[in-house]
Amino acid sequence: MTKALGKVDSVLRGLDGAGQWIGLLSLRLLLAYEFLEAGMEKLGGENWFADIQDAFPFPFSLVPVSVSWFLATWTELLGAIGLILGFGTRFWSAGLIILTIVAWVSVHAGNGYNVCDNGFKLPLMYLVMFLPLLLIGPGKLSVDALIRNRFASN
């Protein structure tokens, strides 16, 4: 029995180690893909924020729509690049969480849960996926980890 528990413990330790390399990277890459796609659509598209500005929560409802569009576009684009590289991961996660909450309140909240009805399921999933990145960090396969290790060894 002790031998079996030792093997289970060994496997679990291996999975813990892999999670620090691959698990958090997978979250970063999936979120980066989603937000990069949204940012690219905004970059080449029409500003539709004027249609929903009244639904923006305070203080975002006070910001001119052209500024909101610019900030949303570049937060999505630069945040996605930051997530891919694992650079400024907590900063970009916090910014994209704020962006997601504004989108949830202004676009998705009144449509129920279902994705097909433009409901809040995807924003909720994004927020849940951002939590480990915000609280734990980007993982070992990241620029943030390289910087941290560089300064920790000095």
Image (cartoon, rainbow, N blue to C red):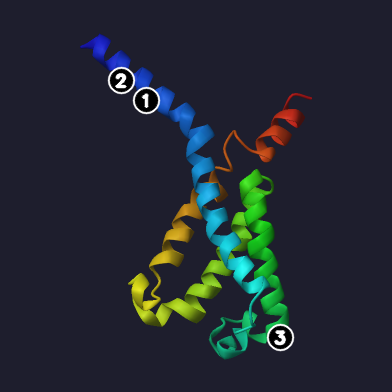
Mark 3 neighbour class, 10 Å CA radius: few under 14, some 14 to 19, many 20 or more: few
In the rendered image, the quadrant that contains the C terminus is: top right
Instruction: Give amino acid for label 3.
Output: Pro
Q: Which residue is mark 1?
A: 12
Dots 2 and 1: beta carbons under 8 Å?
A: yes
Residue under the point 70% across and 66% down: 74
- Say which label, 3 or 2, has the lower sequence index: 2
Residue under the point 69% across and 39% down: 143
x and y, in percent, of residue 135 in the image? 54, 47
x and y, in percent, of residue 69 in the image? 67, 77
> Is residue 140 shown left or right of residue 149?
left
Residue under the point 53% across and 86% down: 55
> Is residue 49 shown left or right of residue 64?
left
In the rendered image, the quadrant that contains the N terminus is: top left
Residue 48 seen in this snapshot: yes
Cα distance between the residues tagged 1 and 3: 51 Å
Instruction: Give amino acid for label 2.
Output: Val
12 or 34, which lies in front?
34
Q: Which residue is mark 2?
A: 8
Q: Which residue is mark 3?
A: 64
- Say which label, 1 or 3, has the lower sequence index: 1
Is 95 rendered above or below residue 62? above
Is 12 rendered above or below residue 53? above
